Image (cartoon, helix red, strand yellow):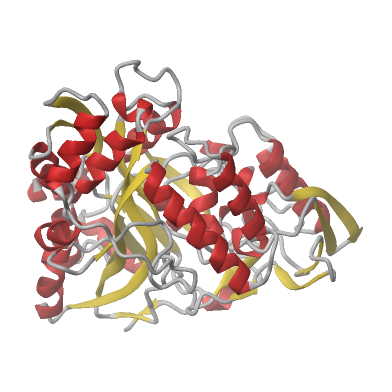
């Protein structure tokens, strides 16, 4: 399999000797990704891997630093009104989009209104507190909110804050020809093979970027990504497998960069999304979902699949967040799981289908889960899918259970609201609890950390009762890189930031 990927890459023109010489001359960085991103439109996209491309291609209104503090981006400064319902942002001048269109306040207004109104936009619930956008000067916008929103600025550090060229974004083929204002502009894409970006010569901070081209290579198998890194066919790869950490550390040509991440992995139950199978007992009774969760030994899963490097979870708020809810994880209890199934009138064995991404790490997790829940009476069938396909099926409700996660956001709202609020745009399970909706909305509307913490405590405890998602573990972000690559750091959000990253001579 390793050899097959390298041969295919060579056929794609990436590993031929001549291409390598050209790549050296053009100062190219090749980055391995765990899967092919979905559509290259920040308002419609949902994959973690697409965020790598957007980070290089699309500047955002604001960004975060290594400590998750919000810092200027295309907005140089901002101010809130006393009641927290008006946000005034001053914008960076002298910025142009890749097609030459000027970035200004009108462009910001266009982008935010597009994110709120575009059919299928996954950013709607993230910035739903915005009532209107007012242009008060060529480089100043005022956002008028329906209610105070403590999480809004954090949303602007990601896809909701990505600025697209208005004229290009109005075209029907934008996803095939995305245009932003970041340091690198779109060059070409071959599905399931590569995405190529080239340096944007008119970028406002061009001197901080040292590569002429950035090539993203989707390689689902972590061992194949590592083989390409070790052979010199990648300069950087995300998602080093836990079992490969020691290999990277022992290789004199490689370095390892890792950090505790904001993201989680879990099992989403289809409760009311799409045409739910009337025989889907997970949709009918929370006790069935709780039984499934209780049949899982999260500590053992971590040891078997990840050599103890991951962190068991019972919520979507990472341990690196100040809002992480300090609540013990329920230990595995097979007998209680059986009792819950009996009380729910379930006859075992109960046939269940779980969507799993078609990479070795996810398959191993699926197989461990298969063995664990089998002891409680679940006959778990694994259905393998390419990552973007899995998310598409999950979004359309064509599943019973799905093994998927989220890369996490600096503010807890970004890791929980869209997934469990009744109107959340990423609520693929169709879960609805008016009390949880109210708590989540209240947490958005206050800037008092203590008040927000109390509300998230209530949310997490209720979700452990209703169990719309069985959270499994928090993921560290582990990168492997060529030792000659200088200036790279791993950040908690897991993204690759290429500013001041270069190859040593």
Give whichever of 478, 12 is nearer the camera.
Answer: 478
Could you say where residue 271 lies in the image, as x and y percent from the top left? Answer: 40, 30
Residue 18 in view, yes or no: yes
Quarter that holds the N terminus:
top left
Viewport quadrant of the C terminus: bottom left
| Residue at left offset 37%, top offset 67% | 261
- Asked whether the viewer can see residue 199, the reply is no
Task: Tell me: residue 274, above or below residue 40.
Answer: above
Asked which quadrant contains residue 424, the reply is top right
- In the rendered structure, the answer to whether residue 196 lies left or right of residue 98 reads left
Q: Nearer the viewer, residue 26 or 354?
A: 354
**Residue at horizontal 45%, vertical 22%?**
274
**Which is nearer the eye, 420 or 495?**
420
| 199 shown above or below 398 | below
Residue 383, by quadrant, is top left
How many tags in the picture?
A: 0
Percent from the top left, x then y, of residue 167?
73, 41
Q: From the top left corner, tell me how far across and down residue 233 is, in percent.
A: 22, 61
Q: At which x and y percent is residue 34?
A: 28, 52
Q: Does residue 218 sit above or below 237 in this rendering?
A: above
């Amino acid at each position: 399999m390793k050899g097959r990927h390298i041969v295919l890459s060579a056929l794609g023109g990436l590993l031929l000797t001549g291409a390598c010489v050209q790549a050296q001359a053009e100062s190219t960085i090749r980055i391995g990704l765990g899967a092919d991103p979905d559509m290259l439109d920040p308002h419609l996209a949902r994959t973690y891997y697409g965020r790598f491309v957007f980070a290089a291609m699309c500047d955002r209104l604001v960004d975060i630093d290594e400590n998750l503090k919000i810092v200027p981006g295309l907005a140089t400064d901002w101010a809130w009104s006393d009641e927290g319902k008006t946000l005034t942002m001053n914008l960076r001048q002298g910025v142009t989009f890749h097609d030459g269109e000027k970035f200004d306040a009108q462009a910001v207004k266009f982008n935010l209104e597009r994110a709120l109104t575009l059919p299928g936009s996954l950013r709607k619930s993230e910035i739903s507190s915005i009532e209107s956008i007012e242009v008060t000067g060529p480089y100043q916008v005022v956002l008028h909110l329906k209610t105070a929103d403590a999480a809004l600025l954090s949303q602007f550090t990601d896809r909701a804050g990505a600025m697209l060229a208005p004229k290009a974004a109005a075209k029907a083929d934008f996803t095939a020809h995305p245009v932003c204002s970041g340091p690198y502009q779109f060059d070409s894409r071959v599905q399931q093979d590569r995405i190529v970006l080239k340096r944007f010569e008119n970028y406002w901070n061009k001197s901080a970027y040292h590569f002429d081209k950035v090539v993203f290579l989707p390689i689902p198998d972590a061992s194949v990504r590592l083989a390409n890194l070790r052979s010199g066919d990648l300069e950087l790869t995300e998602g080093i497998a836990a079992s490969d950490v020691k290999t990277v550390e022992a290789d004199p040509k490689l370095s390892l960069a890792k950090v505790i991440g904001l993201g989680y992995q879990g099992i989403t139950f289809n409760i009311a999304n799409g045409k739910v199978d009337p025989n889907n007992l997970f949709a009918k009774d929370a006790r069935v979902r709780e039984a499934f969760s209780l049949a899982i030994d999260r500590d053992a899963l971590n040891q078997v699949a990840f050599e103890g490097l991951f962190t068991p979870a019972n919520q979507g708020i990472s341990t690196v967040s100040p809002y992480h809810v300090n609540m013990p994880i329920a230990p595995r209890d097979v007998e209680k799981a059986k009792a819950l199934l009996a009380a729910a009138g379930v006859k075992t064995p109960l046939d269940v289908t779980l969507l799993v991404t078609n990479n070795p790490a996810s398959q191993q997790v699926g197989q461990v889960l298969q063995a664990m829940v089998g002891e409680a009476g679940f006959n778990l069938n694994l259905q393998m899918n390419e990552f973007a396909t899995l998310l598409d099926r999950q979004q359309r409700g064509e599943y019973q259970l799905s093994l998927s996660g989220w890369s996490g956001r600096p503010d807890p709202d970004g890791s929980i609201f869209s997934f469990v609020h009744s109107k959340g745009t990423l609520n693929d399970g169709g879960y609805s609890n008016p009390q949880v909706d109210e708590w989540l909305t209240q947490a958005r509307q206050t800037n008092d950390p203590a008040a927000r913490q109390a509300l998230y405590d209530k949310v997490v405890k209720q979700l452990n009762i209703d169990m719309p998602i069985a959270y499994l573990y928090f993921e560290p972000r582990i990168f492997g890189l060529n030792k000659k690559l200088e200036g790279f750091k791993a950040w908690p959000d897991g993204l690759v930031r290429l500013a001041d990253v270069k190859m040593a001579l």
